[in-house]
Image (spheres, coloured by chain):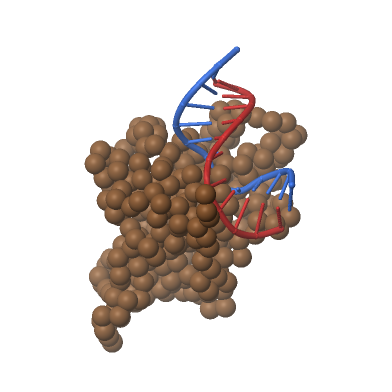
Chain colours: A brown, B blue, C red
Amino acid sequence: MTDMSTITIPVNHFYLKDTFESGQPLSFHAHYDKYSDTLTYITGMEIVNLRFSGTRIVGNLVAAGSGTRFLSNEISTRFRLNDDMEHIYDRIATDDFMKSAIEKYDGMRLTINDPWETALCFIISQYNNMKRIRGIVKAIINKYGDAIKDENDKMVAKSFPTSATMASASERDLMECGAGFRAKYIKEAAAYCTETLDLDKLKSKKYPELKEELLEIKGVGDKVADCIALMGYGKLEAFPIDVWVKRTMEIEYFKGRKKTINELHRFALKKWGEYAGYAQQYIFWQGMHMEDVTNSIEGPEDKQEKPAPKHKKK
DNA sequence: ACCCAGGCGGGCG
DNA sequence: CGCCCGCATGGG
């Protein structure tokens, strides 16, 4: 295996830690080592190892390998390396709050992930917290994913399960993965995305039509549809509003007064326009850190944190 | 024991 | 449209 594929890509405004930790589906199937600043993640049946050093990204293809051309495309697409961050920051630094968020988390990128993976991750995210979302997704991957093997036929990881696989999962097994009341949403969404709607064929659609299609999926509402549009299809005008974004916006822009989702959407679109999605990510991450550290994810440490299946009686 | 989490579907006014 | 409710589950 002396033939490991390695590439180097020059970048600026790139910071691996916040990109990994900020609640994007990328992190649900990956491991980040903060000491070496190295990220190892799974994409399809490939394993990619990423190291960030100063002004460049060094990427390796581990175990299997589809070559440097695949790797270069994979990394620059996934981490949006062609985005002009200077321009985007200029455009969304509309006030002191945004300026401080950008300064604090400079280099945090939005990522683009497989549409089905993104859909499943965000269906699980509803009325849930980061730590549990990670645990549930990892349990599902572990239970339903296919083995990814190295050249010695030894399993080194598991792939993300397809919608077809998840459609035939039993609700009871999904409950044991910790999915809770979302188990039926997962099954229905998986069946729908297998039989009726091919998510990979929506990539050419524009945001409004894309969102409309996504909203047809049972268990996908306004917020999750925007998350999928943003992180599964890279639609930067999507502006997902979760409890953190809502709360933070009400505090920062409306003196703490309650606002409806619609009002906040209109406000965001007018303020940040075609880069609203980036604004959202910085508001979200800054907002979470403003609260006391109760929900801090502390993710990278997890050795094997299991979701504690615990089968209750009743 | 109570409250909350990257919400959604369903029902009602 | 806006509001209210129930929903599974683990952690603070």
Residue A72 horizontal/vertical position (percent): 33, 66
Which of the 4 image quadrants contains residue A215? Answer: top left
Report the front residue among A61 and A168: A168
Counting every numbered tag in the picture gives 0
Which of the 4 image quadrants contains residue C3? Answer: top right
Report the front residue among A176 and A250: A176
Q: Is residue A169 left or right of residue C9?
A: left
Residue A164 horizontal/vertical position (percent): 27, 51
Inspect this view and state whether residue A141 appears. Answer: yes
Residue plotted at (50% across, 39% down): A223
Quarter of the figure with the N terminus of chain A: bottom left
Q: Is residue A300 left or right of residue A230?
A: right
Residue A141 horizontal/vertical position (percent): 39, 61
Residue plotted at (71% across, 40% down): A252
Residue plotted at (56% across, 49% down): A128
Residue plotted at (45% across, 57% down): A177
Look at the picture and state if A133 lies above or below A277: below
